[in-house]
């Protein structure tokens, strides 16, 4: 597999892992189903979006209190 | 790579798991290639259950005109909940292939493995059927086994269903050239010009109904067809549900005696002579006919109470052993045994039988002539020439038949009148239906004592020489 083709595969794997991470957030109740769909759509159309558009779509989750999620995860153990 | 999966959960079966991954991975990465292979693939081509689910997801998105990508397939699988960890399954696919050129060989491999699995399943069903003794007669086992194998081997041939016009016209052109060069006629001529002109030969895959009231000469005409076809080296299979093999053999021989006509109008050897004691000269003549007929590729199955399954099984066997089999004659429809346990009324049963025989003609790619009785209603009306409605009480015969031929002899109903008019022995072969040709009447002459049909122009009272 060429380096460029390999890059495509690597990008796809990263996207899948990224989506899986957001799905986990959805399962924890930290984001809504609509949020998850938006992330999936953004990642799926990543090539069509500008860097700014992508940052805007994904950046809205920066405000999440991820520490709360960690606490919940610990508490769940 | 060919794989025989061996674990406690799965039996040893032909499959190619790597090819399954390659196909799925390539289809997701290069969705524009889906159109080129989608008609050859179905979920059953994927042995690995996870792969089958992923293919179904791809197919679902494709059918709805959606965008195919790893992300969308993941989303589809996530929503359906069909796979516990779709991300892991899809990530494995991204590592499965090197280039899109691997797609077609991989699809070939899946098609081949799936075909082998089907044959294996059929073999297992046959084994189960025999071990559990589900049938009563050996013939039923043979028929069912052939049916299972046929079904298992027939599915994979659908890939060429869609043909472009160039392919179709190419075939037509090749046939046209063959006809022009005299290599291959359009249909199968039966060497009665009056009939061949009407039909341009019986076509492969066609079901031809030859119907008449009893003693009109149905069997004789069919046997004359058989001999004429076989004399060209083409195989003919006769299912005789009424007459036994010897009766058929005698008829074939006797019908040839017609040619030994003496200048005084009599015959060197008559059917009566044949059934008694022949003199030296007659014996020599009879021997010459036997020698001529021995090599004819005519196969006879004389068995009463045959079902369509029996007929199909035996026809397939003969076709497999003699690929030049070109015509099948079944004598006759009303003697074919309906399948056991059928609750349908007779008309529907007959309709099913006729449809199955037409399908057999298509499967074996040859014409089948199915002889049939006509309703008694013919007898009760003034005009006794058969019409389509005389078949109607017997299922959908006319609907399924490609050609419907009736025999009518005036001398059968009105012997005195026929004598007066000189129409004794005159037979009207009425073409009441022809999908690929005109309807109308062909005239032949029936020499009843020789069970022989001849062209009307060859009438025996014509001047000799």
Image (cartoon, coloured by chain):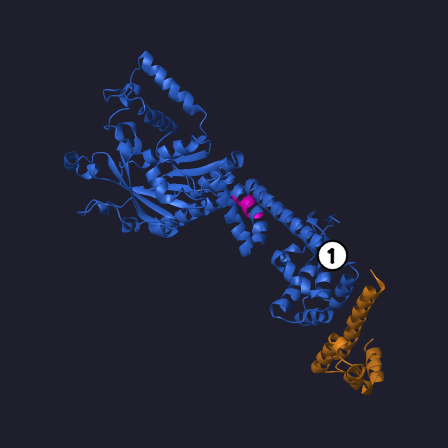
The residue positioned 74% from the left and 59% from the top of the image is B100
Chain B pictured colour: blue
**Up-down: is A31 above or below B388?**
below
The residue positioned 41% from the left and 23% from the top of the image is B292
Output the chain of dot 1. Answer: B
User: Which residue is nearer to you in this view: B280 or B464?
Assistant: B464
Q: Which residue is mark 1?
A: B101
In which quadrant of the rendered view does residue B186 lie? top left
Give the main secondary structure of the magenta stretch. helix
**Up-down: is B251 above or below B396?**
above
Residue B149, given in percent of the width and then of the height, sits at 56, 44
Q: Is residue B148 magenta?
A: yes
Chain that appears orange:
A
User: Which residue is nearer to you in this view: B237 or B404?
Assistant: B404
Using residue B347 as the reference point, say whether residue B97 is left or right of it.
right
User: Which residue is nearer to you in this view: B210 or B246?
Assistant: B210
Residue B249, given in percent of the width and then of the height, sits at 37, 26
Residue A3, given in percent of the width and then of the height, sits at 85, 64
Q: Judge whether residue B338 can be spotted in this image.
A: no
In which quadrant of the rendered view does residue B214 lie? top left
Write the start and end of the magenta stretch as one range: B147-152
Q: Judge whether residue B214 can be spotted in this image.
A: yes
Using residue B330 as the reference point, say whether residue B154 is left or right of it.
right
**Up-down: is B309 above or below B227?**
below
Does dot 1 land on a helix, a strand or a loop? Answer: helix
The residue positioned 32% from the left and 33% from the top of the image is B220
């Amino acid at each position: 597999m060429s380096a460029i083709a390999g890059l495509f595969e690597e990008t796809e794997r990263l996207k899948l892992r990224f989506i899986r991470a957001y799905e986990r957030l959805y399962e924890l109740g930290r984001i809504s189903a609509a949020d998850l769909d938006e992330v999936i759509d953004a990642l799926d159309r990543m090539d069509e979006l500008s860097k700014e558009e992508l940052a805007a779509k994904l950046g809205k989750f920066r405000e999440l209190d991820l520490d709360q999620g960690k606490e919940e995860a610990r508490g769940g153990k | 790579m060919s794989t025989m999966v061996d674990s406690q959960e799965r039996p040893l079966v032909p499959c190619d798991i790597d090819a399954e991954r390659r196909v799925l991975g390539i289809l997701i990465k290069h969705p524009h290639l889906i159109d080129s292979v989608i008609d050859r693939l179905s979920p059953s081509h994927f042995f690995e259950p996870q792969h089958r689910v992923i293919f179904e997801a791809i197919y679902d998105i494709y059918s709805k005109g959606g965008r195919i990508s790893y992300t969308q397939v993941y989303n589809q699988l996530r929503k359906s909940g069909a796979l516990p960890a779709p991300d892991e399954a899809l990530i494995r696919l991204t590592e499965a292939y090197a280039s899109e050129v691997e797609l077609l060989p991989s699809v070939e491999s899946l098609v081949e493995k799936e075909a082998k699995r089907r044959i294996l399943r059929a073999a297992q069903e046959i084994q189960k059927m025999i071990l559990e003794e589900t049938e009563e007669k050996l013939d039923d086992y043979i028929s069912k086994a052939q049916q299972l194998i046929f079904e298992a081997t027939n599915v994979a041939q659908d890939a060429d269903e869609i043909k472009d016009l160039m392919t179709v016209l190419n075939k037509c052109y090749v046939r046209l050239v063959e006809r022009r060069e005299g290599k291959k006629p359009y249909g199968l001529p039966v060497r009665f010009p009056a009939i061949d002109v009407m039909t341009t030969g019986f076509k492969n895959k066609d079901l031809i109904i030859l119907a008449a009231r009893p003693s009109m000469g149905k069997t004789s005409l069919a046997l004359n067809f058989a001999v004429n076809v076989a004399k060209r080296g083409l195989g003919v299979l006769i299912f005789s549900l009424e007459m036994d093999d010897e009766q058929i053999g005698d008829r074939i021989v006797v019908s040839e005696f017609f040619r030994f006509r003496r200048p005084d109008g009599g015959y060197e050897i008559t059917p009566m002579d044949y059934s008694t004691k022949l003199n030296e000269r007659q014996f020599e003549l009879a021997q010459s006919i036997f020698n001529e007929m021995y090599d004819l590729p005519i196969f006879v199955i004389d068995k009463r109470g045959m079902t369509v399954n029996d007929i199909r099984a035996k026809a397939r066997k003969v076709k497999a052993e003699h690929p030049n089999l070109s015509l099948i004659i079944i004598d006759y429809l009303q003697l074919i045994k309906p399948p056991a346990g059928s609750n349908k009324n007779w008309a529907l049963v007959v309709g099913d039988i006729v449809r199955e025989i037409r399908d057999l003609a298509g499967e074996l790619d040859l014409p089948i002539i199915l002889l049939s009785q006509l309703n008694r209603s013919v007898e009760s009306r003034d005009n006794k020439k058969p019409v389509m409605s005389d078949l109607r009480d017997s299922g959908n015969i006319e609907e399924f038949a490609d050609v419907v031929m009736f025999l009518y002899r005036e001398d059968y109903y009105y012997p005195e009148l026929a004598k007066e008019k000189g129409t004794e022995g005159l037979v009207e072969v009425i073409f009441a239906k022809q999908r690929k040709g005109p309807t109308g009447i062909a005239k032949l002459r029936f020499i009843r004592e020789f069970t022989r049909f001849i062209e009307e122009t060859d009438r025996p009272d014509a001047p000799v020489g």
